[in-house]
Image (cartoon, rainbow, N blue to C red):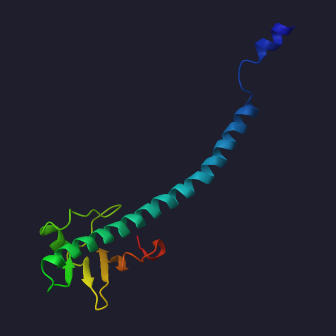
Amino acid sequence: MLKKLIRNEKGLTLIELLAVIVILGIIAAIAIPSIGGLIENSRKDAHIANAQQMVNAARLAYTADNTVTEYTLQYLEEKKYLEPVKKPGEGSYNKQESKVVLGEDGKWIVILKSGDTIHINGDPGTIKRDQVRL
């Protein structure tokens, strides 16, 4: 009699299998939206980091020639003040319209643009994630 009970308990029942599938579905429903938010936040952070690198490169260029107060991304890359900048996600920045400008108050303002989208327009040191457009 004991042998029959042990022999019949070889695998999972259909109910147990369904319970496992339901639990995995719940975990996936929770995880997928939060992963999407992480990817979006990392792209926004990458735009901000690119803008900060452009400011650093513009500061170097400004020390070489302090008569120029506006630097395009193309100029900074061509003059080797900055390594080629890659836009997070697909596409690339508009190298003529993406620029760094030294304001009258001594703050550097960055405009990062690709296509018709202006990703950043302001001081990258004070820009928050919610001000960045993807």
Residue at 74%, 28% (x, y): give it. Answer: 13
In the rendered view of the protein, which quadrant contains the N terminus?
top right
Q: Position of residue 31 (x, y in %)?
A: 58, 52
In-image side of 12 versus 2 (left or right) = left
The total number of labels drawn is 0
Query: Which residue is most to the bottom?
Result: 104
In-image side of 129 versus 73 (left or right) = right
Query: Which residue is most to the front?
Result: 63
Query: Which residue is most to the right?
Result: 1
Q: Position of residue 35 (x, y in %)?
A: 52, 55
The front one of 94 and 100 is: 100
Q: Quadrant of residue 9?
A: top right
Q: Quadrant of residue 114?
A: bottom left
The front one of 58 and 75 is: 58
Q: Is residue 47 above or below residue 127?
A: above
Residue at 25%, 83% (x, y): give it. Answer: 101
Residue at 76%, 34% (x, y): give it. Answer: 15
Q: Position of residue 81 (x, y in %)?
A: 17, 68
Q: Position of residue 93 (x, y in %)?
A: 27, 70
Q: Quadrant of residue 100?
A: bottom left
The front one of 75 and 11 is: 75
